[in-house]
Image (cartoon, rainbow, N blue to C red):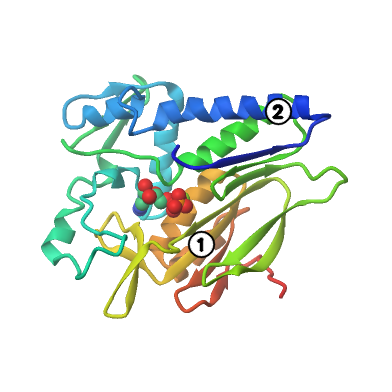
Amino acid sequence: MGSRFDITVVAEDSIEGNAYIDMAVNEIERIEKLISSWDPTSQTSEVNRNAGIKPVKVGRELFNLIERAQGLSRLTDGAFDISYASMDKIWKFDGSMTSMPDEKAIESSVDKVGYGNIVLDKENSSVFLKLSGMKIGFGAIGKGYAADKAKELLIAKGVEAGIINASGDMSVWGSQPGGMDWKVALVNPLNKNKVFALLPVKNGAVVTSGDYEKYVTFNGVRYAHIIDPRTGYPATGIISATVFAPKAELADALATSIFVMGIKTGVDRVNQLPGVECILIDDKGSIHTSENVELEK
Ligand code: ADP
Ligand code: MG
């Protein structure tokens, strides 16, 4: 998936452990083949190629993933949208931009974006992107989904504890040998050498989205690399969003969309969701959390 995965399993010995890790790797590769927009032979690419032309029959797994993604779009009022992928890339976050793109260009950059134009036909298991030039992409949930699936597979094989870490999107189950909970360290992006919280995670997922080096500043406003699919403007105000949820797929989608929703709406939305918590850092370095998070110094 163009990103690093670290897999940890608890097993009797390293031979058994490595066998389990190989199974997880195969599962992640299987999912990549399904959801990759780069691989021209993937079902996702076929859907994209037929945008504005015709519905494409896809396997149940991809159909269900897209259906859940639409649910996440509704949950976030469109802040999360897998059809973001057709957005014209008019923002550059590599330091090459010297001024804001003009308003018209920003507006038209999202012409082909909108989850309402993804037509799902459950009976035929088909997906139709209504507008020609439309595209879907799983950049904001693919890693989380893969981490969940690898975890699910290993649990089914009898692995009692482990961590699937998809470049910071973590799916965790069981506990360390000896019974201690797994712990996740959170780093303040404004001071990367300092861990500001060490939190126990039992069974669930922890995902962090951060703008780190990827942002531009105009007139004193810091624009993050995550773009609001409704307006074409980059998110502002947040530099790091960590979400705890039962599943990495949900945590991944929420972490990305909280950037777009902003601190107040983001925290409010998380407070309405059972089993979901968040820790946000704003562009002044202040920390905001959902109701049930207690940070000890
Ligand atoms: P990272 O993988 O860097 O932690 P995220 O999980 O936050 O980042 O996902 C960012 C990626 O998600 C972007 O690179 C892009 O592929 C995709 N994306 C950006 N904005 C949106 C959005 N509003 N809705 C869905 N996907 C998005
Ligand atoms: Mg994400």
Residue 229's spot in the image, x, y percent?
Answer: 29, 54
For residue 75, say whether it is visible: no
Q: Name the residue under label 1.
A: 241
Residue visible at 57% across and 38% down in the picture:
147
Label 1, secondary structure: give it.
Answer: strand
Q: Residue at x 26, y 63 (%)?
A: 233
Label 2 residue SS:
helix
Which mark, residue 18?
2
Q: Which of 181 and 185 is in front in this view?
A: 185
Check disc 1 and give the amino acid type. Answer: Ala
Q: Which residue lies furthest to the left in this view?
A: 104
- Judge by depth and name the residue closer to the eye, 226 or 245: 226
Left or right of 9, for residue 38: left
Residue 144 visible (yes or no): yes
155 shown above or below 177: above
- Which image quadrant is residue 1 in? top left
Q: In which quadrant of the rendered view does residue 100 lie?
A: bottom left
Quadrant that contains the C terminus: bottom right
Left or right side of 86 for 195: right
Q: Is residue 248 above or below residue 259?
A: above
**Which amino acid, mark 2?**
Asn
Residue 202 numbered tag: none
